[in-house]
Amino acid sequence: MLRGRDILTILDLSREDLELIFRETDKLLELKGGTLDLLKGKIMATAFFEPSTRTRLSFQTAMIRLGGEVLDLGEVDKSSIAKGENISDTIRMLDSYADVIVIRHRLEGAAKLAAEVAENPVINAGDGSRNHPTQALIDLYTIRRFRGKVDGLTIGVLGDLKYGRATNSFIASLTMFKVNMIYLISPPQLRVREDTKELLVNAGIEFKEVERLEEVVSELDVLYASRIQKERFPDPSEYELVKGSYIITPETLRNAKDELIILHPLPRVDEIDFRVDSLPYAKYFEQARLGVPVRMALLKLILGG
Amino acid sequence: MRLDSGKELILRKIKDGTIIDHIPAGQALNLLKLMGITGREGFTVALVMNVESKKLGKKDIIKVEGLELKPEDTSKVALIAPMATINVVKNYEVVEKRKAVPPEIVEGVLRCRNPNCITNKPNEPVKPRFRTVNFKPPKLVCEYCGYVMTYEDIVKQLLSEQ
């Protein structure tokens, strides 16, 4: 069902596709460590035109653990991009060497352009401020793993809902589920975009925009936190004013349900107090760890291993 | 052109040319600009604005003597005057009538307004492409970045490029 397909946005996948990937991930997790030979002889190229640690390394680990090989474009300032080569030509070259291409780029739609140029499947590892489909897969899988299901839950998404590609993909992914309620928690400057809201409206999902976590924390089953970047504020003093309201501490979680889980796509800067790490709510490191098996499942299904 | 008894509006019949009817009220001048008609080309042009219409409430009409609108211009017309009727007149008879339906895919006509869209990157072989999600008024979504172009965005851009 997924063999040979491009994954450019989370909405390229259906609910059935998601369930298939999750079942495959379950199986891979049972294997615990070691290297398989499911994708022996296959090559994955990673083209990260923008810096990344977790995403690049977890894709590469996933491919190696499936028995495949990895080609990395390397740092853009040291490759032929620095000499002025465009994306299309770079992708065409990688396409002739590898069986699948994983791309990250600052510009929106770069992955779609890559998919149009390449014969082989392309996986979007984040482009612009909208799409990061494999992160959304990991987020959903983490919720499923710790809460058993996504349907019926009350979910809070906190932070930069306007420019954050992880938050946008996560919110879009929830339209494939019957969640109880979504709270969109952000300062007014970083509220979710109209087109994302339209997705929720069209899917008949109830949601509410709020400015303070404390207002809704007692209702949440899942809290998805994200980084608020100082650069998003035209006036630094405005940032200083709002940032305190979006830092998660043991105190802000005082009224939380016992079963609440906290996710974060990482890296975090100071939006989650280190003291929260040792609380049972904190699942963001587990979430990062699950990046490898989820991406293994996806690569396996796309390359037909 | 003359106004007849204050109620009915009569425009002189044209021999050969194009009549665009059912233009959204107030858009006729924009449409002429888009069609590149400045008045200096020598065409006889008749234009009425804000006349009553059963379908639209109010509408504009344009008649241009001597101009035959090319089929490829229909989609541009449709973006400013969705669902307008284009009548091709030959020897005083309407020989062809077509609706200015916005195409489902608009390619190459408009630029994406999102500065971070890949289609705005120089030196990439990629043409801007939009999917029409609403026909009247037209609303387009960039196929690459998902940016939503509203009717106002479209009109503004088409006119600024004339």
Image (tube, coloured by chain):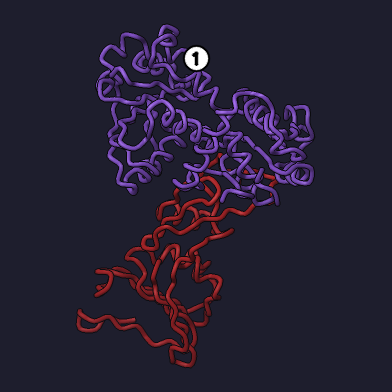
- Label 1 sits on residue: A269
Which residue is drawn at the image coordinates 53% and 52% (left, top)?
B143
Residue A242 appears in the picture as rendered: yes
Helix, strand or loop under label 1: loop
**Chain coloured purple in this rendering:** A
What x and y, as percent, mark residue B66? 52, 82
Which residue is drawn at the image coordinates 51% and 51% (left, top)?
B142
What x and y, as percent, mark residue A26? 52, 33
Q: In this view, does A64 lie to the left or right of A216?
A: right
As drawn, the residue found furthest toward the top would be: A275
Q: In this view, does B46 lie to the left or right of A293?
A: left
Q: Quadrant of the C terminus of chain B?
A: bottom right
Q: In this view, does A1 lie to the left or right of A283?
A: right
Residue A106 appears in the picture as rendered: no
Drawing shade for chain B: red
Circle 1 chain: A
Image height of B31 relative to A132, above or below = below
